[in-house]
C-alpha cells in the first residue's frame, strides 16, 4: 500500500475540500473558546458568591454562639439536650454514615464520624465542616456543605436521628 | 478479493475493540453526558463547578475527540457498539430470511442528523432552568445501563423502556440510527473543533472516475466531495479500508494500516481512561 502523506492546505487542487473543513474548524474553535470563557467567568463569580456565603455562615455561627453563651450565663438557656452518648446512621452518598454524638451539660460537646465506608475521603473531609457548625449553633438545622452535599446531608441527618433520644420533653 | 479481505480485517478489528470497551468501560458515554448536565445544573443553582469524576470524563473525552476525531463514538461508546450489534444482527436476519426491512432514504437522513442538536439543546436548557430532574428518570440510557450491568431487580421507568425499544427498532433499520439522529453526546462532540488533520479525506487525483465507494460505505452519510458535514464522522474507517486506490486516508495516521491505527488509538484511549478516569 503506497505511503500517503497529506499536509493539507498545500497544493491548489485540494483547495475546495480543505478550505471547507478549515473554515468549519475555525468556527468551532472560536465557539469553543467563547463557551469556555463564559463558563470561566461564571466560575469566578460563583467562587466569589460561595466565599461570601461561607463568611456569612461563620458570622451567623459566631453571633449565635455569643448569644447562647450569654443566655447560658444568665441561666436562661433551656438545656435542650439530655446528657449521654448517642449513635445513629443515615444515608450519605455511597452508603450509611454512622455518627456518635456526645452531649454533656445539656450541650452537644462532640460529634464523631464513626464509620463512613462508602464515602469518598475527599468529600467526607469537606463534609465534616458541618460538624463545627452544628456544635457552634447547638442544633442540626444548618446548611449543608456546598460540593459535598450528600455526605454532609448524611452527617446532618445521622446527628438529627441520634439526638431524637436526647431532646428533652418540655 | 484482496480488498474485501482488508475490509473484513478492519471491521473485525473494530468489532474487537468495541467489545473490549463495552466490557471494560461501558459507562463513559453516560458519565461524560452527566458532566454536561452537572455543569448546567450547577449554573442554575449558582454553585461552583467542581471537577467531579463526570466533569473529568467529559474533559478527557472532549480532548481526545478534538485531537483524534470522534474515535470514541466509533469504537468506544457502549451504546454505539450496541447499535452496531443490533444492526449487524438485523442485516444477518434479513439476509438469511431474504426479507428486507424498510430503509430511511438518504435525503431524509441528512436532515434528521440535525435533530440531535435539538435534543442536546433541550436537555441543557432544562438543566439550566432546573427542570430536568423530572425527566431524567425516563432516560432510555438509564434503562440500558442497568440492563448492561445486569441489574434486573431495579425499578425501570416505563417511558424509558418504550424509548429504548423504539431506539432498538431504529437501530435495526439504519446503521448508527441513534448516534446520527438523537445522541446528545454525539451532538456535543460534533460541535467540537476536530482538527482536520485527523479526519478522513480524499486525494481526488488518485480516485477512480465515478467510484463513490467511500460515500456508499459511510454510515454517517458524509458527502466526501465537499465534506461539509465532516463532523458527523465517527472514524469507523469504512471509507479508508474500502478505498480501492488508497485515495481516502487519514493524514494523522501517516500511512499506517487502518486496523493498526485503530488499535493504537484504542490502546491510547483505554490507557487514558484507566490512568485518569478509573
Image: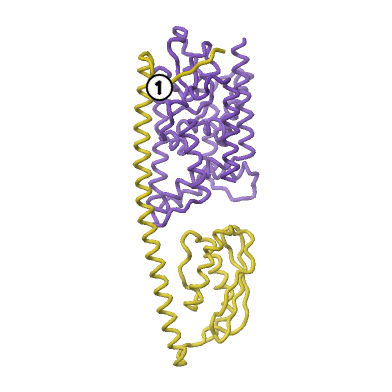
In this rendering, the answer to whether A81 lies above or below B1 is below
For mark 1, name the chain.
B
Residue drawn at point x = 45 percent, y = 16 percent: B202
Q: Secondary structure at mark 1?
A: loop
Residue drawn at point x = 62 percent, y = 71 percent: A88
Residue drawn at point x = 54 percent, y = 16 percent: B242
Horizontal and vertical percent for residue A122? 55, 58
Q: Is residue A38 left or right of residue B154?
A: left
Q: Is residue A119 left or right of residue B200?
A: right
User: Which chain can be seen in yellow?
Assistant: A
Judging depth in this view, the residue of B201 and B94 nearest the camera is B201
Quadrant of residue A59 in the image? bottom left
Judging depth in this view, the residue of B256 and B80 nearest the camera is B256
Quadrant of residue A92 in the image? bottom right
Disc 1 packing (10 Å; few <14; some 14–19; many ≥20): many
In this rendering, the answer to whether B263 lies above or below B50 is above
Horizontal and vertical percent for residue A105? 56, 87
In this rendering, the answer to whether B138 lies above or below A76 is above
Q: Residue furthest bottom?
A: A74
Q: Which residue is mark 1?
A: B227
Judging depth in this view, the residue of A18 and B94 nearest the camera is A18
User: Where the N terminus of chain B falls, by quadrant?
Assistant: top right
Q: Is residue A12 left or right of residue B242?
A: left
Quadrant of residue A49 in the image? bottom left
- The colour with which the image depicts chain B is purple
Horizontal and vertical percent for residue B64? 50, 36
* Colour pattern: by chain
Amino acid at each position: 500500500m503506497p505511503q500517503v502523506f497529506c499536509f493539507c492546505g498545500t497544493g491548489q487542487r485540494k483547495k475546495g475540500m480543505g478550505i471547507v473543513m478549515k473554515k468549519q474548524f475555525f468556527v468551532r474553535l472560536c465557539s469553543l473558546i467563547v463557551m469556555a470563557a463564559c463558563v470561566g467567568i461564571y466560575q469566578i463569580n460563583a467562587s466569589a458568591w460561595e466565599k461570601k456565603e461561607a463568611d456569612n455562615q461563620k458570622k451567623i455561627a459566631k453571633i449565635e454562639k455569643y448569644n447562647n453563651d450569654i443566655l447560658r450565663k444568665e441561666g436562661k438557656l433551656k438545656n435542650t439536650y439530655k446528657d449521654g452518648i448517642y449513635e445513629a446512621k443515615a444515608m450519605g452518598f455511597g452508603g450509611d454514615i454512622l455518627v456518635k454524638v456526645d452531649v454533656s451539660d445539656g450541650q452537644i460537646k462532640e460529634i464523631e464520624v464513626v464509620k463512613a465506608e462508602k464515602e469518598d475521603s475527599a468529600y467526607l473531609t469537606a463534609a465534616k465542616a458541618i460538624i463545627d457548625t452544628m456544635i457552634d449553633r447547638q442544633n442540626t438545622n444548618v446548611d449543608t456543605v456546598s460540593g459535598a452535599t450528600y455526605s454532609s446531608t448524611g452527617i446532618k441527618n445521622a446527628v438529627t436521628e441520634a439526638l431524637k433520644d436526647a431532646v428533652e420533653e418540655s | 478479493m484482496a480488498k474485501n479481505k482488508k475490509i473484513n480485517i478492519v471491521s473485525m478489528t473494530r468489532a474487537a475493540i468495541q467489545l473490549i470497551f463495552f466490557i471494560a468501560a461501558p459507562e463513559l458515554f453516560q458519565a461524560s453526558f452527566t458532566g454536561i448536565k452537572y455543569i448546567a445544573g450547577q449554573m442554575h443553582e449558582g454553585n461552583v463547578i467542581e471537577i467531579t469524576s463526570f466533569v473529568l470524563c467529559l474533559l478527557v473525552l472532549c480532548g481526545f475527540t478534538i485531537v483524534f476525531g470522534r474515535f470514541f463514538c466509533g469504537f468506544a461508546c457502549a451504546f454505539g457498539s450496541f447499535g452496531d450489534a443490533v444492526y449487524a444482527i438485523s442485516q444477518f436476519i434479513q439476509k438469511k430470511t431474504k426479507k428486507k426491512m424498510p430503509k430511511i432514504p438518504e435525503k431524509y437522513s441528512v436532515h434528521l442528523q440535525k435533530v440531535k442538536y435539538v435534543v442536546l439543546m433541550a436537555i441543557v436548557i432544562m438543566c439550566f432552568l432546573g427542570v430536568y430532574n423530572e425527566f431524567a428518570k425516563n432516560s432510555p440510557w438509564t434503562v440500558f445501563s442497568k440492563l448492561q450491568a445486569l441489574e434486573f431487580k431495579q425499578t425501570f421507568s416505563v417511558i424509558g423502556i418504550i424509548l429504548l425499544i423504539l431506539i432498538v427498532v431504529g437501530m435495526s433499520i439504519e446503521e448508527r440510527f441513534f448516534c446520527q439522529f438523537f445522541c446528545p453526546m454525539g451532538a456535543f462532540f460534533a460541535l467540537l473543533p476536530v482538527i482536520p488533520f485527523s479526519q478522513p479525506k480524499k486525494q481526488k487525483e488518485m480516485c477512480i472516475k465515478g467510484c463513490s465507494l467511500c460515500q456508499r460505505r459511510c454510515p454517517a452519510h458524509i458527502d466526501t466531495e465537499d465534506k461539509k458535514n465532516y463532523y458527523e464522522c465517527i472514524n469507523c474507517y469504512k471509507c479508508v479500508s474500502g478505498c480501492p486506490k488508497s485515495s481516502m486516508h487519514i493524514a494523522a495516521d501517516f500511512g499506517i494500516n487502518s486496523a493498526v491505527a485503530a488499535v493504537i488509538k484504542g490502546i491510547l484511549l483505554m490507557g487514558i481512561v484507566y490512568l485518569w478516569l478509573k
